[in-house]
Each structure stands twice: as C-alpha cells, then as structure tokens.
Amino acid sequence: MTRFSDLVHPSAGTALMSQWLTGTAERSRTAADTMLGEWASAPAPPGRLAQHIFLATDGSGLLFYAQWSSDEAHLRWARTHRPQLVSRVDALVPGIERPGLTRTRLADSLVHDATRPAGLLVVSTAAHEGNDTAVLTAGMPLPGLLATYVHHTQDGEQTIRITEWDHARDYEAARTTGPGRQYTLYGGVVDEDGAAGLTLPLRQA
C-alpha cells in the first residue's frame, strides 16, 4: 500500500476527514468507484489539492481524506457541487450513513521506517492534551509500526492519530486499548494546475 507520507500535500491548508458507513465491502467499493469516476471526469475545483479514499478492512465503510488549500475553498465547492455528487452515489448505493465531516490540520509526524510498504492504516481519536510528542511516541518501540501522523481538529478539542503498520497482526499484537478504525488505501485523485484529477488505480483492498 502507498505510504501516507506520499499522500500528504505540502500546500494543504486543511485536511478533511469523513466516514461513509455502507455496511458491506461490495457497497463500499461501488460508492468509492463512483466517487473516483466523478472526480476524474470533472475539472478540478479551485483549491482542491488531493482526495483519497480508504476502505475499512471489515468492509463496513469508507474513510475520505481530502486536502484543500483552505476551508473557504472547500466550502465554496461544497455549497454548489456536493449535493449533486452525493445524490448520484446514493442512487447506486442507497442508505449510506454519513456521521459528519471533521476539519483538521496535520500537526506532526514521526516515521520509523520509510522503505517498507504499509499493510494497514489505523485511525483513532482522543481528547487533545497538548503534548504531540507523547502521542507520537506512545508505547515505543512497537514492532511493525512504520509511522505516526498527528492531526488536530479545527476546534482544538481532539487529536486524531493515524498510524501505519507493516501487517494487521503487528497492530493486534501491540494494541492495549480498544481497536481503532482500520483501513487500506483504495484510490484517489491528485490535482495538478487546475486540471482534472489523476486517478490512482489502487485496488489492493
């Protein structure tokens, strides 16, 4: 699986995370493929830098990770274009639950191994306590942990921790609390100079 560091856009002013709960892997893939097709066929909206989709390992849903130049740029697009886009997905995959969008910024990261491909990405959320170093280094060293990325929510209330693991078994052996949400990268678009997004045909999931 492509490493998360390769997805991070240096010009991003905001990183948006949202879940779609579909219920099954087949419904998840249909929704993801529809979104990828829509993104690739339309001109890139001003301010969008990259958009990636992760598939839950249990097939229950999707995680969207979008990077925009600013929240304002995203909101301008969302007000005018998002409803039509979502309605086309809902026509094919009715009943998707969408708990909501979380606006974040990438605050810090720590890469332990930059060479091995990641087999699993885990997302967990906790109250923000103001010590990113502790979040990055919690429980070190952990066999199989490749990297940790810390995001802060816009309101400063929460920390979202994204970890990359060599294998799912390494994560299961290391965790001491309830499981985080587990994903693999499914696909995405990266926008270049206002052109239509380049579809990344990632189908490892």
Image (cartoon, rainbow, N blue to C red):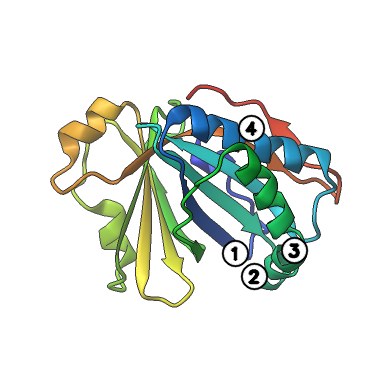
Q: First in sequence: mark 1 or mark 3?
A: 1
Identify the residue position indicated by label 3 in the image. Answer: 77
> Viewed as shown, does residue 184 lie left or right of 58?
right
Label 1 vs label 3, nearer the camera: 3
Mark 4 crowdedness (10 Å alpha carbons): few <14, some 14-19, many ≥20: some
Report the amino acid beneath label 1.
Thr
Q: Quadrant of residue 53?
A: top right
Label 1 vs label 4, nearer the camera: 4
Tag shown at residue 14: 1
Identify the residue position indicated by label 2 in the image. Answer: 71
Nearer to me, 204 or 171: 204
Residues under labels 2 and 1: Cα distance? 6 Å
Mark 1 vs 3: CB contact within 8 A: no
Nearer to me, 114 or 76: 76
Nearer to me, 93 or 73: 93
Tag shown at residue 33: 4
Tag shown at residue 134: none
Report the amino acid beneath label 3.
Trp
For label 4, the SS is helix
